[in-house]
């Protein structure tokens, strides 16, 4: 796109007006929805609530219910964030979106399914040694997901290095189908269940009202993200990775092995997706060959919302996306009288994407990239 | 970079528009209950109709008719059903009468379609000849459980003018596409497992949007299942408030609405009827929405995997801790019932306790059928609609018998209108599934719905036999 | 200088390179000896950048040999050559703009493992460029052009090179800074590091260099001492702006 060089006082075109209208519309709807929500929390029988609920009073959310939404949004968002990191890192280094990244996540979840059931057969899953067992499961899932990502890079993307960016993008869609179908071939098309979690994992922590398993998801995700942050920001390899992302030629001039660094990038992204996969399994106890698709798309959206190529942005994007997804149906759509608001969660996600791109095209934390960095 | 973001934004807008349109359609479908096929859409059974029962007396009696035919054996030309308005199928001396089975026999739903097809094949064998002409169901056709599959198969069928009628489809979505073609060709179709109200009527005398005159079914109309669940919750459990969750699919949408309507007619309070997206895994938002109305019962007639997540997560949502969970036949399968979280849930579904019920045309009982089935196929059927398909086949063959005569050249003449006339007049027919009565819109099914309470994930047959409520509208 | 008695650190022997069907460098012979300062002059598209890239292994010659300390290194990667003491300050500096100044310097020492040596070199660079030390935590992209030049040189020095290649060091700098820049280069040279400079500003380059080559459409057309080149009438005409 030719950079939009706007001359001061230049006439607005129809498209500009339309975009402005869209911005005002979306922000307006959000504002009205939020106000309506607050109003019906104060008085479920206010005139606006009656208007949007066919003349009847709206329902009020209790604090535990509201808290439940926040916790579920955070845990879901933490997983999106973990997956989004992989999209963002690969985009940063190679400049293309690896659409097969969602499948890496799915492979992690599948490995977790196999491991957990093996442990369950041995009677270890729901036993006193659950903690070491779950750690081993996380480790193995992470390793398998990492291996998947690395093999993917070696087999599918490296041969395409240097070709136009569209080529690896299309290849990644093909890789995605390949992995999905390979899993179907190996394990069948049906849903695969994780064994039931130990009871204490299903409990709710009294005062704070958080389910233990969701807390576990949030904590593990936070530790992983912190670990990744440390790796990228503080270690030599991490610095090399950032250098490669910015300028491969000069990075190699520093003596950095660019290929090795790219493999490391895929591996680290894969590891994060693998961790997300096993957390997903613990939270939802079910995985099928297509499990990676929707979370993958949403994580990708999270990466864009946060600013592609920006790791902090990917995490923040994931958490805000997950929270928006959990909260928006009841805090924005339901007060506006939308029926079956939860069915529109995906629409919420993509509206958020549009809104962010309209207001800040580089994403929430994205930096404007100069033309010498990116074509 | 900017270009990339622009494309992305366009993509996202399209997705948004698609999502918005999709939901509008869903809302429209809530009342129209248009039939998009789903495997478990078919996992329902047949119901009897009040009005049809009342009409019964005014109509001529089945057995009387049979007597008629027996008497007029000599000069059959004058004494067959039908006025010839849809033409005649002439089966030459020595040729076979052609009917077809059209069921979902491949893919994920083969567990449903295969027993249906085998039910058809066994019924043809058990029934024997019609006026000295043998009957064949030919090679079993596949409806692929989709509109496309139903349409393609129907085109193939109507191209063969020797075919009198078909038994199928397995899935309502396939039927929606197949019924117009079959009906326009003068043929009939009798389904053993379609349950969408859109294919027949709303049980208030209004034809469904997808109803066609040549369409019949021995499976129940979902409106009865909703009513059965409502009665159970209100009268049996004594609960006065309830909510329902559908997944946007016409089957689940129709069933959730049927339940809600029946429940409020009984005097109960429906706190909400809402939807989830089929691919959703995190059900906390939708469950919280439901919880805001504090219902005592929650009916979620959806499928796996969404059903798994609802069952698993409901207990963790504030306000739903003590809510009674209710599911329908879409989840009445080993996959769901094998999960720990499904224990304690009540399921509505067809009454499949066929026991010693006997089909009046073939004299074969359900027990005999199962023995033969196991002998032929090595295992028991995985879905219960073999009985409905068997009875459907016997009904079709009875109708062919009633609408046909052997002419001077020794050829069998079958009046297509006569076949429909016979089916329209079926009352009090005893089949494997119970008593069959056809109403004006092709709903012929036996009417029993049972509700079971699931007790043990490790012993699913015991739970399936644990009937806590029976429903049969009179 | 008694070049005859020393082995060159870096040498081109009859190098030919192609970009697709285009013949870029044609039978180029060069030699850089320890501790000297040489410059390569030439107009646009004369093959100067290709020469640098070939020296560093980013471009592989079609025929001929790149020799490093007497070893033919045609098929060795850039990192191998960097490890053996060759490094470059690229044209336009090309700092990692989103990384901090400190990180840029650390990456310069990417291949080194001698912690003490790295620490010493850092101190040396801080002494040489006190402004760099002040801006250590700042992102490199936020620095001024002159500061960026310092960081770029510091980054190159962190590799503890024996030969420093400089691609157009005065390009893009304000005129006032050009002089300072050449003073810096001399300062580095005085520490015993050989400098191979590719420069359009021939006057300036030749005034500090020992020797020079002139490259024209991929061929070395002149190869002489800096003083001789400065006196060369052809060169004066085409590069030194004298009619």
Image (cartoon, coloured by chain):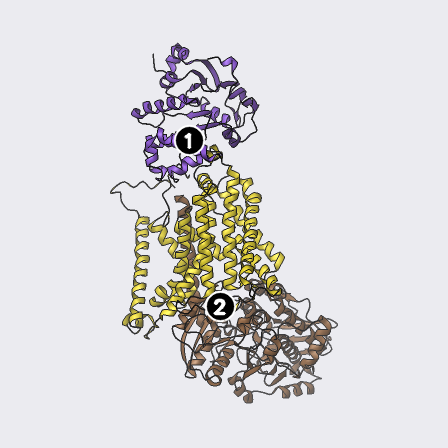
Determine the CA span between mark 2 and mark 1.
57 Å
Q: 10 Å neighbourhood of mark 2: few (<14), some, or many (≥20)?
A: some
Give the colour of chain B.
Answer: brown
Residue A285 can be seen in this image: yes
Pointer 1 chain: C
Q: How many marks?
A: 2
- Specify whether A278 is left or right of C123: right
- Residues under numbered marks 2 and 1 in contact, where contact means CB atoms less than 8 Å apart: no
Q: Nearer the viewer, residue C84 or B12?
A: C84
Q: Position of residue A76 (x, y in %)?
A: 44, 60
- The answer to whether residue C198 is above or below residue B14 is above
- The answer to whether residue B68 is above or below residue A370 is below
- Residue at 55% in and 46% down: A150
- Specify whether B306 is left or right of B406: left
- In the image, which lettered chain appears purple? C
Q: 10 Å neighbourhood of mark 1: few (<14), some, or many (≥20)?
A: some
Q: Which mark is residue C121?
A: 1
Q: Nearer the viewer, residue A357 or B438?
A: A357
Residue A80 can be seen in this image: no
Q: Nearer the viewer, residue A146 or C116?
A: C116
Dividing the picture into quadrants, the one containing residue B136 is: bottom right
Q: Position of residue B263 (x, y in %)?
A: 44, 80
Q: Position of residue A121 (x, y in %)?
A: 62, 65
- In the image, which lettered chain appears yellow? A
Q: Which residue is mark 2?
A: A202
Q: Nearer the viewer, residue B197 or B128?
A: B197
Dividing the picture into quadrants, the one containing residue A70 is: bottom left
Under circle 1, the secondary element is helix
């Amino acid at each position: 796109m030719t950079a939009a060089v706007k001359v001061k006082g230049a006439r607005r075109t129809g498209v500009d007006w339309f975009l402005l209208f869209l911005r005002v519309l979306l922000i307006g709807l959000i504002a009205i929805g939020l106000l309506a929500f607050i109003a019906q929390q104060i008085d479920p029988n206010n005139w606006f609530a009656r208007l949007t609920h066919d003349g009847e009073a709206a329902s009020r959310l209790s604090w535990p219910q509201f808290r439940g939404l926040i916790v579920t949004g955070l845990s879901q968002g933490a997983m999106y964030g973990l997956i989004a990191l992989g999209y963002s890192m690969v985009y940063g280094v190679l400049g293309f979106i690896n659409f097969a990244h969602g499948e890496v996540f799915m492979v992690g979840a599948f490995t977790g399914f196999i491991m957990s059931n093996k442990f369950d057969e041995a009677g270890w899953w729901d036993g006193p040694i659950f903690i070491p067992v779950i750690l081993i499961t996380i480790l193995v899932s992470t390793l398998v997901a990492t291996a998947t990502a690395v093999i993917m890079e070696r087999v599918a993307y490296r041969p395409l290095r240097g070709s136009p960016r569209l080529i690896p993008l299309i290849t990644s869609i093909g890789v995605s189908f390949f992995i999905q179908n390979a899993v179907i071939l190996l394990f069948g098309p049906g849903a695969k269940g994780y064994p039931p979690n130990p009871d204490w994992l299903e409990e709710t922590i009294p005062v704070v009202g958080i389910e233990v398993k969701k807390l576990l998801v949030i904590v593990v995700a936070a530790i992983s993200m912190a670990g990744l942050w440390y790796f990228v920001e503080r270690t030599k390899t991490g610095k090399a990775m950032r250098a490669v992302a910015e300028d491969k030629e000069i990075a190699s001039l520093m003596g950095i092995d660019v290929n090795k660094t790219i493999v490391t990038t895929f591996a680290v992204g894969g590891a994060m997706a693998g961790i997300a996969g096993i957390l997903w399994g613990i939270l939802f106890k079910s995985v099928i060959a297509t499990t990676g698709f929707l979370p993958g798309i949403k994580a990708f959206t999270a990466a864009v919302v946060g600013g592609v190529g920006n790791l902090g942005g990917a995490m923040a994007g994931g958490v805000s996306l997950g929270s928006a997804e959990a909260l928006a149906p009841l805090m924005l759509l339901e007060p506006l009288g939308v029926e079956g608001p939860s069915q529109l969660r995906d629409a919420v996600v993509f509206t958020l994407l549009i809104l962010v791109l309209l207001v800040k095209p580089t994403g929430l934390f994205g930096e404007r990239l100069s033309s010498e960095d990116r074509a | 970079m900017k270009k990339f973001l622009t494309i992305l934004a366009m993509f996202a807008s399209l997705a948004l528009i698609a999502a918005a349109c999709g939901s509008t359609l869903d809302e429209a479908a809530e009342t129209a209950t248009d039939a998009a096929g789903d495997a478990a859409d078919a996992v329902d059974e047949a119901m009897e109709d009040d009005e049809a029962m009342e009409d019964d007396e005014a109509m001529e009696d089945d057995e009387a008719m049979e007597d008629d035919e027996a008497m007029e054996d000599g000069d059959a030309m004058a004494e067959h059903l039908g006025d010839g308005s849809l033409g005649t199928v002439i089966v030459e001396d020595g040729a076979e009468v052609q009917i077809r089975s059209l069921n979902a026999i491949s893919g994920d739903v083969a567990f449903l379609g295969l027993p249906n097809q085998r039910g058809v094949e066994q019924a043809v064998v058990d029934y024997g000849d019609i006026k000295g002409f043998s009957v064949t169901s030919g090679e079993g056709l596949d409806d692929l459980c989709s509109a496309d599959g139903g349409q393609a198969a129907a085109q193939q069928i109507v191209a063969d003018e020797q075919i009198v009628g078909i038994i199928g489809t397995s899935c309502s979505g396939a039927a929606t596409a197949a019924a117009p073609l079959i009906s326009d060709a003068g043929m009939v179709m009798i389904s053993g497992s379609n349950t969408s109200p859109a294919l027949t009527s709303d049980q208030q005398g209004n034809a469904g949007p997808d109803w066609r005159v040549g369409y019949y079914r021995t499976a129940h109309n979902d409106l009865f299942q909703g009513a059965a669940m409502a009665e159970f919750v209100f009268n049996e459990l004594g609960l006065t408030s309830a909510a329902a969750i559908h997944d946007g699919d016409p089957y689940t949408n129709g069933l959730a609405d049927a339940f809600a309507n029946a429940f409020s007619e009984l005097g109960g309070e429906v706190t909400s009827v809402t939807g989830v997206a089929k691919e959703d895994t995190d059900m906390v938002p939708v469950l919280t929405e439901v919880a805001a109305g504090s219902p005592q019962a929650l009916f979620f007639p959806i499928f796996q995997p969404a059903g798994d997540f609802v069952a698993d997560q409901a207990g963790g949502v504030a306000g739903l801790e003590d809510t009674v969970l209710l599911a329908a036949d879409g989840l009445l399968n080993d996959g769901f019932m094998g999960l720990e979280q499904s224990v304690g849930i009540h399921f509505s579904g067809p009454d499949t306790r066929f026991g010693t019920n006997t089909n009046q045309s073939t004299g074969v009982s359900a027990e005999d059928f199962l023995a033969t089935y196991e002998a032929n196929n090595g295992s028991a059927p995985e879905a219960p609609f073999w009985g409905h398909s068997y009875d459907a086949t016997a009904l079709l063959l009875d109708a062919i018998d009633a609408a046909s005569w052997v002419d001077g050249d020794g050829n069998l003449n079958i009046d297509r209108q006569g076949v429909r006339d016979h089916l329209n007049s079926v009352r009090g027919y005893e089949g494997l599934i119970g008593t069959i009565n056809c109403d004006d819109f092709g709903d012929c099914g036996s009417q029993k719905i049972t509700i079971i309470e699931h007790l043990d994930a490790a012993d699913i047959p015991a739970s399936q036999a644990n009937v806590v409520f029976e429903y049969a509208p009179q | 200088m008694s070049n005859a008695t020393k082995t060159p650190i870096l040498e081109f022997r009859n190098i030919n390179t192609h970009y697709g069907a285009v013949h870029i460098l044609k039978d180029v012979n060069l030699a850089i000896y320890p501790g000297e300062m040489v410059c390569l002059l030439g107009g646009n598209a004369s093959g100067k950048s290709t020469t640098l890239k070939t020296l560093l292994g980013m471009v592989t010659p079609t025929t001929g040999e790149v020799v490093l300390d007497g070893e033919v290194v045609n098929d060795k990667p850039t990192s191998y050559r960097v490890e053996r003491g060759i490094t470059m300050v690229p044209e336009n500096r090309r700092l990692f703009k989103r990384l901090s100044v400190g990180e840029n310097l650390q990456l310069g020492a990417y291949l080194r493992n001698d912690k003490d040596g790295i620490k010493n070199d850092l101190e040396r660079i801080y002494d040489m460029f006190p402004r760099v030390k002040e801006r250590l935590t700042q992102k490199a992209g936020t620095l001024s052009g002159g500061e960026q030049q310092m960081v770029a040189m510091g980054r190159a020095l962190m590799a503890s090179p024996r030969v420093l290649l400089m691609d157009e060091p005065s390009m893009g700098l304000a005129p006032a800074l050009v002089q300072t820049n050449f003073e810096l280069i001399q300062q580095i040279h005085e520490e015993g590091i050989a400098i191979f400079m590719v420069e359009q500003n021939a006057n300036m380059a030749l005034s500090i260099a020992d020797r020079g080559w002139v490259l024209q459409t991929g061929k070395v057309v002149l190869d002489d001492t800096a003083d001789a080149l400065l006196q060369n009438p052809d060169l004066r005409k085409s590069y030194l702006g004298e009619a």
